[in-house]
Image (spheres, grey):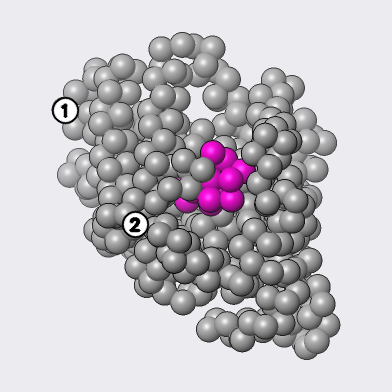
Amino acid sequence: MSTLKAGAAAAERGETGLLSGALHMRDTVILAMASSGPTQSIATSLAAIVLAVAFAGFLPIVICFVPMIGIAIGYQRLNAWQPSAGATYSWVGRSLNPHAGFFSGWIMLMYYTIGTVSLTPILGSYLLSFFSNAAANDKYDTALVGTVLNILVLVVAAVGIKISSRFQWTWAVFEYTVLLGFCVTAVVLIYSGHISHSVHITSAWFTINGAGGFHALISGILIAIFLYSGWDTAAYVGEEVEGKAAGSAAITSVVLLFVIYAVGVVALQGVAPISVIQAHAADVLAYIGQRIGGGFWADVMIVAVLGGTLASLQAAIVSAGRISFAMGRDRVFPRWFGQVSAHYRTPMNATVLVGLLNVVFLWGSTLVGSIGTALGDIVSTLGLIAAMFYLLTAGTAIWCYRRSIMSSVADFFLGGVMPGIGAAFMAFVIIYELATNALNGVEIGFGFGFAAFGLVLSLISSRVGKARFYSDPTVSHGDSIESELAASPESPEGVPL
């Protein structure tokens, strides 16, 4: 029995489930892309990419694209089996081990709650910069304005997934039009000679030597993983999407993100030499807007970044709320998390809590320096945390379909090779990062220590709550995996079950 059937059973018991069929595939793609936040990500990472690999930023972006597509295919196949608000939490818990599933859910919550703490001050700073530079640089003013904006998107996320989708569409049309418009304009002005000291494309932009060697390339790849991460939001709204389109939306999102990041980085990095981009690392897109069209267009770019950051924050709240909801529904979290608003058909309790946690973390880091330092250390490890749950998802996709992988060439390629490439790539990144001491002991201690604390909570939950998820995770929402796969028809996405 699938999660959708479980939702029907819950309705018969008088319980309210999430609003099935509320989102079209295109809505899900926009939500997933907003979670990645292309404009905001380029604004915060362009200088870092140029520092890591000079002007060879396209190389790590295209290298990461292949394993990311493999992982997205894994998400698609798992979603075809069971659309679940818990996604990796549910899939890993039912297929591999319930404690591994809880750990997956825990680290995803880390990523989507602690990882958004840095977004809120940016919101305050960008908005205040239109009125007062002094206020924009005051941590209390930026925290206050950031809190107001955080609560605004929290309300939108809490009152309905359809309203959230409309909010995302409003910003997406403006944001991507501005970003791609600036990319085209930058290329035209650079090659027409209208921007002084600009840099033209050479073959070195596409070679490992041009990136500075293998070690530099790996540094660029780590940044590229950060750029892509977030598209998995498509999976967390899987129960609210028409049919089983969330899997296809995940793949589409990765493809579109590749196009935007590849075009954006290649087009915009040539506007100025490396040293100048580094000097404007904090406001690089505003500086590029200034060079391309003057002060007005710099402000337009700031608005695009501001909107993209708001959309990214809202998508993170939506994701974390649904992961928490799924864990509450399975009783591995208190059942309070698993309650759904009868009026709005959203996981109201979980959504409001994770949204307010962001505000608590924000003011904790603003008022208490040691809290800010600890959260910063955890944030430093979130790239590896993302690699972990991507690795777990790709590995689970292979394991779940292991009996059908050799049944056809398509099954072997889509069910084995592509997710296998994604899993191997993420495993390599994690091992390389730890082996080369890219993170210091304090960062590893806080980041991985907090992640490991999830296993402690899982052990406590299994003994105190005694949820059936632990005693037999395969019946958390139905019968055994094998019988479900055998009984299910071919999915609408063409994924053979």
Q: Quadrant of residue 351?
A: top left
Q: Quadrant of residue 452?
A: top right
- Image position of 405 (left or right of 63): right
- Amino acid under disc 2: Arg
Which residue corresponds to mark 1?
Answer: 131
Residue closest to the eye, 227 or 53:
227
Which residue corresponds to mark 2?
Answer: 345
Residue in the image at 57% along x and 82% along y: 491
Residue in the image at 37% along x and 64% along y: 19
Residue closest to the eye, 276 or 70:
70
| Residue 361, position as x, y percentages in the image | 45, 25
| Residue 207, position as x, y percentages in the image | 67, 58
Tell me the magenta residue range: 321-334
Q: Quadrant of residue 166?
A: bottom left
Residue in the image at 42% along x and 74% along y: 242
- Image position of 370 (left or right of 23): right
Q: Earlier in the sequence, mark 2 or mark 1?
A: 1
- Amino acid under disc 1: Phe
- Image position of 379 (left or right of 179): right
Q: Is residue 207 visible?
A: no
Residue in the image at 68% along x and 51% along y: 468
